[in-house]
């Protein structure tokens, strides 16, 4: 497993070695990036976060529709690390347990093969949607003007006016470009492949450490059936709320309306298998939608025409081969990386990764 370069310091600081406040850029406003930013702000540093999408959330991103929201990425999370547990306790009620005891394992024809065992760890969701957690964490940054959305970082380079510092070039959807300079460090809280590209542009040795990381894409289909809200009819199709599937097209289906704090209108999120998603990554979206709808009908028996159907393509969704350590930090260069893919693919992995990178930097 690749390791951090020898220049990386220990995450434990010497006594009396408190560092002066610095201006730190974080690229990515998902769980890892915002957890990292919060920790650095608490340590007294100035932080600027850059996010290419209109709102923070990363792969906890939720999608709105006329019939309610969909959790287009992460479906739930676990809380095993006591540090995450303590953070969640500061905002009681924001996250709620979701009963996933009805998860089924389905064969390719939609037949129930087995009921999953009762999970050892409760399944949690943020309410009223998954990205509510990250957005709550990001609110102080946004209020202070330190969260820049619709700002995709397209270039990272040494600061042209201040030796030893970094500058970033961002692009917005309307094509406008902006240069942000004067950063003492840049931390990439983004998927491994785009992080590797930015690091390679500045000839950072960290880029080589990411070469062994492997991530799979995912097509996500979101369907709404408001016609189920009729007298004597509360749901369509199966009585379970979530299932893993061995169907070659679909790996996971979940009834969004079963999650706490959600609209009761019948909605389903369907996640394609990593293999099928990779094979059809560049297919026409209409063709992908039709194929996934057909597979969904085969699995659930729901053949009714949905009132709403929408796709989300994730190019970097599930970690197949993690980095094997929580983060990378090159102190002399002032460059670091974090993300769930460092440890696995869980929301909790992203939190731990961002937190531990911040502790190393602070």
Image (cartoon, grey):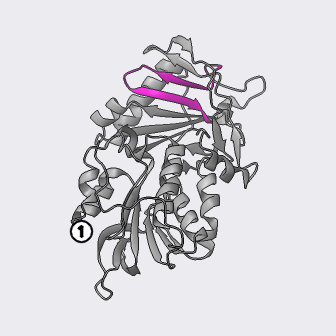
Residue 334 is one of the magenta-drawn residues? no
User: Residue at the spot x=34%, y=51% of the render?
Assistant: 192
Residue 243 is one of the magenta-drawn residues? yes
Answer whether residue 72 is visible to the viewer in this image: no
Vertical side of 63 occupied by 300: above or below:
above
Image quadrant where residue 103 sits: top right
User: Residue at the spot x=51%, y=11% of the render?
Assistant: 111
Residue beneath disc 1: 202
Vertical side of 336 occupied by 342: above or below:
above
Vertical side of 327 occupied by 174: above or below:
below
Between 281 and 214, the residue placed more toward the observer is 214
Q: How many marks?
A: 1
Between 305 and 67, the residue placed more toward the observer is 67
Answer whether residue 270 is visible to the viewer in this image: yes
Vertical side of 252 occupied by 172: above or below:
below
- Quadrant where the N terminus lies? top left
Residue 59, percent from left and from top: 48, 48
Residue 180, percent from left and from top: 39, 79
Magenta part of the protein: which range? 237-256
User: Residue at the spot x=58%, y=64% of the render?
Assistant: 38
Residue 254, percent from left and from top: 57, 30
Between 35 and 55, the residue placed more toward the observer is 35
Residue 53, percent from left and from top: 46, 61
């Amino acid at each position: 497993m690749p390791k951090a370069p020898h220049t990386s310091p220990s995450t434990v600081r010497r006594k009396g070695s408190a560092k002066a406040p610095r201006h730190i850029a974080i690229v990515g406003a998902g769980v890892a990036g915002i957890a990292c930013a919060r920790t650095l702000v608490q340590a007294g540093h100035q932080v600027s976060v850059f996010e290419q999408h209109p709102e923070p959330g990363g792969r906890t991103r939720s999608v709105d529709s006329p019939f309610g929201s969909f959790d287009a990425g992460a479906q739930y999370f676990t809380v095993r690390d006591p540090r995450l547990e303590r953070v969640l306790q500061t905002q009681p009620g924001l996250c709620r347990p979701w009963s996933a005891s009805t998860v089924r394992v389905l064969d390719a024809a939609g037949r129930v093969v087995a009921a999953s065992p009762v999970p050892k760890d409760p399944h949690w969701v943020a309410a009223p949607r998954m990205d509510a957690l990250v957005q709550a964490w990001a609110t102080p940054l946004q209020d202070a003007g330190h969260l820049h959305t619709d700002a995709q970082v397209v270039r990272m380079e040494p600061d042209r006016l201040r030796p030893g510092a970094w500058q970033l070039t961002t692009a917005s959807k309307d094509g406008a470009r902006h240069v942000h300079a004067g950063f003492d460090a840049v931390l990439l809280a983004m998927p491994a492949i785009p992080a590797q590209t930015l690091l390679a542009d500045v000839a950072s040795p960290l880029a080589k450490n990411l070469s062994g990381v492997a991530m799979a894409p995912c097509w996500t289909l979101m369907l709404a059936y408001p016609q189920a809200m009729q007298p004597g009819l509360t749901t369509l199709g199966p009585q379970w709320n979530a299932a893993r599937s061995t169907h070659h097209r679909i790996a996971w289906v979940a009834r969004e309306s079963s999650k706490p704090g959600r609209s009761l209108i019948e909605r389903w999120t369907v996640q394609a298998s990593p293999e099928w998603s990779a094979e059809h990554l560049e297919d026409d979206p209409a063709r992908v939608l039709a194929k996934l709808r057909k597979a969904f009908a085969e699995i659930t028996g729901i053949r009714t025409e949905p009132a709403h159907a929408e796709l989300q393509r994730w190019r970097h969704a599930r970690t197949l081969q993690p980095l094997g350590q929580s983060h990378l930090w090159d102190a002399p260069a002032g460059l670091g990386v974090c993300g769930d893919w460092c440890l696995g693919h869980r929301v909790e992995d992203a939190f731990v990764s961002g937190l531990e990178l911040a502790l190393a930097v602070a």
